[in-house]
Image: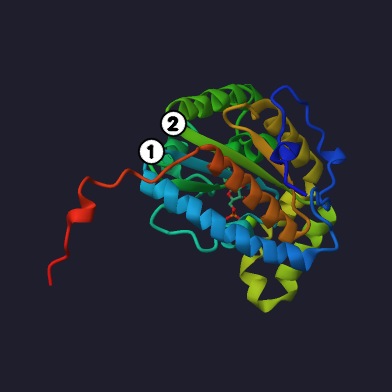
């Protein structure tokens, strides 16, 4: 069955209810066909590689992919598996951690704007300015009267980027609380995953419901035609990779890019010995 990416899209006037969306769902794919799903991903990797090469050669478009999720939601795994094979020259990952004191001394979009893609580039935001209405809201890091205004700033900022030629794709990796427990437990149990364990993730886990509510508001209030949010069922990693690859490929295909026209007279040139 063909993937209809609109299925995952948060409609601009929609009030999202995340509790109604099953993180174990596998729309347009048979959940039992995991092996075939993994094989299909290899084909999609090749197609994404071609499209990214075209983006780079064409040099006229800018693409921004924003990844947000709860801890252990699969942001890093997505970057590794979906972008396997793309040309590192034209692809960049920008990770947004706790702001430094210099960053905190500026408005919250200051550090973000610096990292947006230039012509021909595809930039992946691993976390983003959305942290400024997520962790900042739930932990009360700034007063409500300040974060409350940020939804409108974000919509305006992203609209500006879009108007100036940036294609924006925002992906929320939707996992269940039970799946998060398993993944955090694996980080404790498996020595090669110990480095990923952050005790701070448990503090965040305890506030699961508050975070889900903050995500719901952020997604509902900032999903626009120019910068849509997609909710990805992410409990099954193989399916998450498949759905995200489809969304990126279809978005890049819609740009209808072509290779630059060759310089005149190439067929008359002989390479000297
Ligand atoms: P990780 O992605 O696991 O390396 O963790 C990065 C941490 O930085 C997470 O706990 C985020 O919530 C936190 N973080 C990112 N941006 C902000 C922000 N603007 N304000 C406060 N914390 C942030
Ligand atoms: Mg973490």
- Which residue does the numbered mark 2 point to in the structure image? 165
Disc 2 CB within 8 Å of nearest ligand 1 atom: no
Give coordinates of residue 185: x percent, y percent.
77, 67
The crowding category of the residue bearing disc 1, from other C-alpha atoms within 10 Å (few below 14, some 14 to 19, many at least 20), is some
Give coordinates of residue 201: x percent, y percent.
70, 55
- Which residue is drawn at the image coordinates 73% and 40% (left, top)? 8
On screen, residue 263 versus residue 186, left or right, reads left
Give coordinates of residue 84: x percent, y percent.
54, 63
- Which residue does the numbered mark 1 point to in the structure image? 60
Residue 82 occupies quadrant: bottom right
Where 69 sits versus 169, above or below? below
* Residue 184 appears in the figure: no
Disc 1 CB within 8 Å of nearest ligand 1 atom: no
SS for tag 1? loop
Name the colour scheme: rainbow
Q: Earlier in the sequence, mark 1 or mark 2?
A: 1
SS for tag 2? loop
Give coordinates of residue 68: x percent, y percent.
64, 45
Which of the image's four quarters has the C terminus? bottom left
Give 259 or 75, whichever is nearer the viewer: 259
């Amino acid at each position: 069955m063909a993937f209809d990416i609109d299925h995952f899209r948060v409609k601009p006037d929609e009030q999202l209810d995340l509790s109604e969306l099953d993180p174990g769902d596998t729309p347009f794919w048979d959940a039992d066909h995991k092996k075939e799903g993994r094989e299909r991903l290899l084909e999609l990797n090749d197609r994404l590689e071609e499209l990214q090469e075209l983006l780079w050669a064409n040099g006229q478009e800018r693409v921004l992919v924003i990844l947000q999720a709860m801890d252990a939601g699969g942001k890093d795994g997505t970057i590794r598996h979906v972008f396997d094979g793309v040309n590192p020259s034209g692809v960049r990952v920008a990770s947004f951690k706790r702001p430094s004191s210099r960053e905190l001394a500026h408005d919250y979009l200051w550090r973000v704007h610096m990292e947006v893609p230039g012509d021909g580039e595809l930039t992946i935001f691993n976390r983003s300015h959305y942290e400024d209405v997520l962790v900042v809201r739930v932990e009360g890091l700034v007063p409500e009267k300040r974060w409350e205004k940020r939804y409108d700033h974000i919509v305006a900022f992203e609209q500006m980027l879009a108007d100036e030629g940036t294609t924006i794709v925002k992906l929320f990796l939707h996992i269940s609380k039970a799946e998060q427990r398993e993944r955090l437990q694996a980080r404790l149990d498996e020595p090669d995953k110990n480095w990923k364990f952050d005790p701070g993730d448990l503090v965040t886990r305890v506030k699961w419901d508050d975070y889900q509510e903050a995500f719901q508001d952020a997604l509902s209030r900032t999903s626009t035609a120019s910068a849509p949010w997609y909710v990805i069922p992410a409990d099954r990693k193989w399916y998450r990779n498949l759905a995200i690859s489809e969304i990126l490929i279809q978005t890049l295909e819609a740009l209808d890019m072509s290779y630059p026209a060759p310089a005149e007279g190439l067929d008359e040139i002989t390479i000297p010995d």
